[in-house]
Amino acid sequence: MIQINVVARIAGDKNSFIDIIYLMHRIKQSGMNDVKVLFIGGLHDTVVYHNATRLSELLGVSDRVGFTLKSIPLAQLPQEVKDGYFLHFSVGNFIGYSAIETVNMGFKSIFYNADPALEAGMTDSICFCRNMDHFIELIRLLSTDRANTDAAIIAGNKAAKAKINLTEDDKIKLLSILVPQK
Amino acid sequence: MRKVLIVNNCLFIGGAEKLLFELAVFCRSQGLEPVVLILDNYEIEHYDKLLKELKIEVIRVRLSTLIHFRKPLYMIRSILWFIRLKYFAAKTYESIQVIGLHNVDKVYHVIRHPHRSFWNVNNTIQFYNKIYPYQDFMLRNPDDTIVCINEYEIDELYNQYGRDVIKSEIKLFKLFLNDTD
């Protein structure tokens, strides 16, 4: 089983549900039946939730899509969820704090580019998926060669983690923003 | 102790709120005193507890509508803060850090300070038709700084508003964690 986790509250400013449910449909069409997705986050907008569940029914993937319907700190997630793959939207090579946090906690993390205009300039790393086809190919690799693909994802995550820390130059630059001298 | 005012509209679990928290922790590590100002929202949220544990002051006030007769104490407090921010912010704080350009129009004319930084925490892909919904007045003051958290945002701002409109200084600063595992 390939367990995919998406950390996102169910709210009107989140548009990831439709895309990911459609991804699950594409994965099913590709003949891969051992993939599930769990949306981890509180229920803030019932319309968004009902639209997401209705779409998963229409596409025939309801059995592969789950919702926690409450926010759960990452550290308190069940081990089988922690052992899964945390999927985050990226903007080109840029990843946000939810991705930074799962990378920092050592969870296997995958980044899916949300902006097609930025595909061409993206990092050549297995954990950065340029588009839907790239993501489905990654799932296929996980289905056929889990150990090597995991190792490549973990290596890519380590490279991402190395950029999170503040260097001395970063600290000087941040201080110049917080306490400007001009 | 030198104070830095950090402004946002909530403290629930979210990326912008995590940035606020990390900025506050960084301030502390550098001997600065962060003060968090939450606009138009009196809920107790996720980061309230964490900031309280660090003894970082969180102030919740309404600045958009000061008149609030059903809660007179809140109203008086908001009026006092309005005056304080409008006329004395420059004497009290080293800088003003506003998280999210969506919050800037709420404070742009209220908080007067020669060192204001407006953190842009969104890319255009998050908006309808990939267009920022912000008014351009907030980009025109050369004394202000727009802090972008990725290089794409810089291109997106210049492409949408143009270099003749954007007079504020634009800086790039990455998202970060103070303590990594």
Image: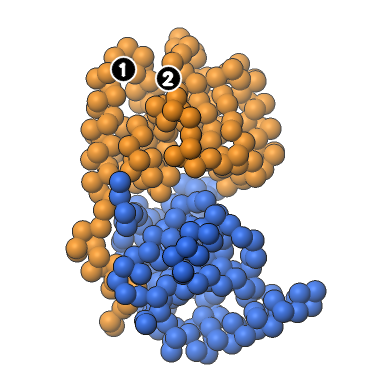
Q: Label 2 is found on which chain of the structure?
A: A
Q: Which residue is mark 1?
A: A146
Tags 1 and 2 in contact by the CB under 8 Å rule? Answer: no
Chain in blue (letter): B
Nearer-the-camera pick, B171 or A73: A73
Q: Residue at x 69, y 32 (%)?
A: A50
Q: What colour denotes chain A? A: orange
The residue that disc 2 covers is A2
Q: Chain of mark 1?
A: A
Q: Is A4 on the left-hand or right-hand side of A176?
A: right
Q: Position of residue B141 (x, y in %)?
A: 42, 78
In this rendering, the answer to whether A158 lies above or below B25 is: above
Most distant residue in the left direction: A168
Quadrant hosting residue B5: bottom left
Residue B46: x %, y % from top left: 54, 54
Amino acid at the residue labelled 1: Arg
Relative image position of residue A115 (x, y in whole percent): 41, 41
Depth check, front residue: A100 or A58: A100
Residue A80 horizontal side relative to residue B72, left or right: left
Kindly state the secondary structure of the residue where label 1 is placed. Answer: helix
Amino acid at dot 2? Ile
Instruction: Looking at the picture, tell me which residue is in the foreground, B62 or A182.
Output: B62
Kindly identify the residue that appears in the image at 38 percent across and 64 percent down. B25
- B93 lies above or below B175: below
